[in-house]
Image (cartoon, rainbow, N blue to C red):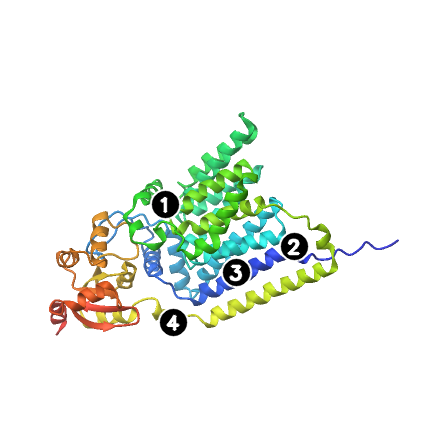
Amino acid sequence: MSAAPRRRVDPNALLPWACVAAVTGWLTALALRFPARDGDLLWQRWLGERILREHAIPRALGPETFAADGAPWTPHEWLFSTALAWTGEHALRWALPVLCALAAAVVLSTVVLRCARRGVSPTGASAAVLVCAFAMLQSFGVRAQVLGWACLSVVVLLLEIDGPWAWAAVPATAVWANLHASAFLAPATAALIALATVMRDRAWSAAVRRSTMIAAACAAATLATPLGVDLARYAGALLTSPIRDSIDEWTATSISNAGFLAGALPLVLVLAAFGVRASLRDRLLALAFALLLFCAVRNVPVFALVAAPIAFAALPRARAGAVRAHPAARGGAWATLAAVVCCGIAIAAISWRGAPAAGDALPLGTAHALLAQTRAPRVFCENFAWCSLFLSEPATFYMDGRCDPYPAPLWRDYRDVVRGNRRWAAVLDRARIDAVLAQRDGALDSLLAERRGEWRRIASDPVADLYVRPALLADARP
């Protein structure tokens, strides 16, 4: 009796997963070694410490901000902040960066699985992984929105299953709602899929009933947070929030954005050329997320992770069965797989060794100088996120990295100052601001330097120059 022939490993089938592993290694190095480019982690750690200490989520800004004390606040990233503080207190500062890298791995893995469900070749699935990696790279970091990407990718994967497993999208939505306000994409996506099912069946079929009930359940799951209906109010307010004019990630997507060029634009072009080949459900999803794409730069990775499998499935497929069976093609596939693994290791190692120092991202030197040379200053930061450095210090500030709860008039005055508009000096005077951290060699830096009688530069670092009113220094003398 002859033995059954041994099944050989197909290197082509391993290629997408090798790409996922290579990108994950690279992102892990970035998350662990590269410092945050803004002050978000400062206020989030402070928030988490408050939650752990007080066993309650603060719902209003406090006296740390003299300009908006008492303003309503919906800290939608409360769970992320709590985890950040807890891991910091238990010598596990590496845990959340690794979790964010693993979240990116979940995103890319779901892209591979959704490609496979649509019959996309391993080469196409590998290309989809790389396109999504380019789209994510510009916004990737130790951030709650990265965990939101993972939740979105899992929810979309589950909702595309025509069966009972689609109900798992409901608890996934509840988890997502406690991590990030983008959770409202879950009921919106479920509603689109329900609409596509109605248009397909043209009757109140079992599939229509199930998809409609899942969409309603996902909407209800967004209420399963300590914030209740306030989370929905917050998400709705973001549509017209004044922060959209002052934060790069909230500006409209344009051709100048690297993530759009490398990650989203190729998908848009493929969908424009071949999207008619996609199913009705896929066309609806691609169109809805394309509208999101052009609303804000932060939606570039969101569009890519949803649309990449749809776009690559729409491409015409070549007949490559005979070529794939050729021994030379098999050897080339193994060589490609080895090259991907080697490139992933090399890029991760280079990123690890080339990480900049933490002081290159935040004005730590000027912040320390201000606290050392003054007493109870009222601070304005040109990059508002810098003022999160003073959350636990004897200083108050105009605005910090929490940004969302600050009223619209404050944002208008903030833009007048940082843009050097005619009212800039009057805003600083009216708010009784006596210390300013200005972007080094920026417009505000030049304006303050010209007013030597009113402002004195007392410190500089690679990021910012520190200006104070002479009276502040006089008050600090013993």
SS state under label 3: helix
**Residue pictured at 13% horizontal, 73% vertical:** 477
Callout 3: 10 Å neighbours few (<14), some, many (20+)? many
Mark on residue 24?
A: 3
Instruction: Name the N-terminal-most of marks 1 and 3.
Output: 3
Q: Is residue 229 visible?
A: yes
Residue under label 1, please give it: 226
Kind of residue at disc 1? Pro
State which quadrant residue 53 falls in.
bottom left
Is residue 204 left or right of 140 when viewed as pictured?
A: right
Instruction: Name the N-terminal-most of marks 2 and 3.
Output: 2
Marks 2/3: CA distance? 18 Å
Residue with the most extreme bottom position? 478
Kind of residue at disc 4? Ala
Residue under label 2, please give it: 13
Residue with the most extreme front position? 273
**Residue pictured at 63% horizontal, 62% vertical:** 336
Residue 471's place in the image compared with 141, above or below, is below
Which of labels 1 and 3 is toward the front?
Answer: 3
Which of labels 4 and 1 is toward the front?
Answer: 4
Marks 1/2: CA distance? 44 Å
SS state under label 4: loop
Marks 3/4: CA distance? 22 Å
Marks 4/1: CA distance? 37 Å
